[in-house]
Amino acid sequence: GDITLRRQTISLPQNELTLRYFSSATSTSSIHPAQRPRAGGSRPCQSHNRRLRTNNNDRNNQSNKRSQLQGIKATIDFTNSLKRLVSSGDAKSLAEADRRLRYNLRYWNDNRSLARPNDYSFGVVLGAYSKARRIPGIAVRAEELLELMMDTYEMQEKRDGNNVWLIPSAFCTSAAISAWSKNTNILFDKEMSPIARASAIVDRLEQLHERYGRPQTQPNAAVYNALISICAFVNNGRGAGRQLSIDQRFENAKYAESILDMMEAKYIAGDSSSRPNVRTYGSLIQTWAGASSISNPR
């Protein structure tokens, strides 16, 4: 027969109806499996974003590493080109190497070059200056190049002490000082004082070390030996246009001996890099020998 259904009306409060509607609409059984929340409350879209960020960071790190490797290779190639250029030792090649080094440093500061000149790049040119002979103005150019290196270093320390890539080393300093003793033309200039110029270089290096405390800027025995060698060079210069008096040569010898006393004091205090060696005493003996009027004929 016929089936009769009896309709019953259930009246519930409005808030309870709303609660039942939303609870049934958001039931986990009615949600697609891909949209269900995972353990820990994180949704797939959030983890996907994290994976994207991780992948982007990995790509950025790989790109930075490639850029660093390219910069290192460019620096090595640039330094090797300087070595090939100064190998001849003539004035024209040294001037060209000096020019390239200065321009490359400017280009790097302007972000126009991958090759970043370092202390080894400067050491190649300064070392060539220290070995060059009979080239007018070679010592002045070496000193100017070292001053550029020191100015760049000090600018980096003032800007960001954690990102310093050019430090005036003891080798570069001693090479610039030695350039004053490799050119006899200096002694013909009565206005030029090699000892005063070399002493000013050492004084500034000591100031940089005291101010910023980097061990690379600490003067060592090589720097002090180069300074004593300047004294011996001046006192024993033959055929010099300026004739030093005995008193002047004696003052030069006393100054050289004071450098030795300072080296010995620093070594006793624990600075092993300032230990005097054979060259130290040999240059001092030459300085005192040049202080005699017999050993330095007019």
Image: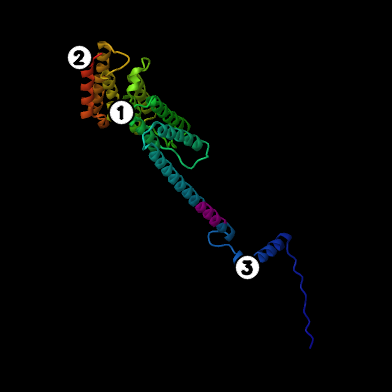
Label 2, label 3: how many angstroms apart (C-alpha)?
107 Å
Side of 26 relative to 294 (left or right): right
Side of 231 relative to 126 (left or right): left
Q: Earlier in the sequence, mark 2 or mark 1?
A: 1
The mark closer to the camera, 1 or 3, is 1
Q: Quadrant of residue 216?
A: top left
Q: Secondary structure at mark 2?
A: loop
Q: Quadrant of residue 242?
A: top left
- In magenta segment, residue 78: no
Point 47% across, 50% down: residue:
66
The mark closer to the camera, 2 or 1, is 2
Image spot of residue 102 (x, y percent): 46, 33
Please name the residue that numbered disc 2 is placed on: 294
Image spot of residue 122 (x, y percent): 39, 34
- Three-letter code, disc 3: His
Q: Are marks 2 and 1 in contact (CB under 8 Å)?
A: no
Please name the residue that numbered disc 3 is placed on: 32
Q: Secondary structure at mark 3?
A: loop
Label 2, label 1: how many angstroms apart (C-alpha)?
30 Å
Label 1, label 3: how many angstroms apart (C-alpha)?
78 Å
Please name the residue that numbered disc 1 is placed on: 223
Foreground residue among 289 and 123:
289
Q: Are marks 2 and 3 in contact (CB under 8 Å)?
A: no
Foreground residue among 287 and 17:
287
Q: Secondary structure at mark 1?
A: helix
- Residue 116 visible in image: yes
The overriding secondary structure of the stretch rendered in magenta is: helix
Quadrant where the image shows the N terminus: bottom right
Q: Which residues are magenta?
A: 49-59
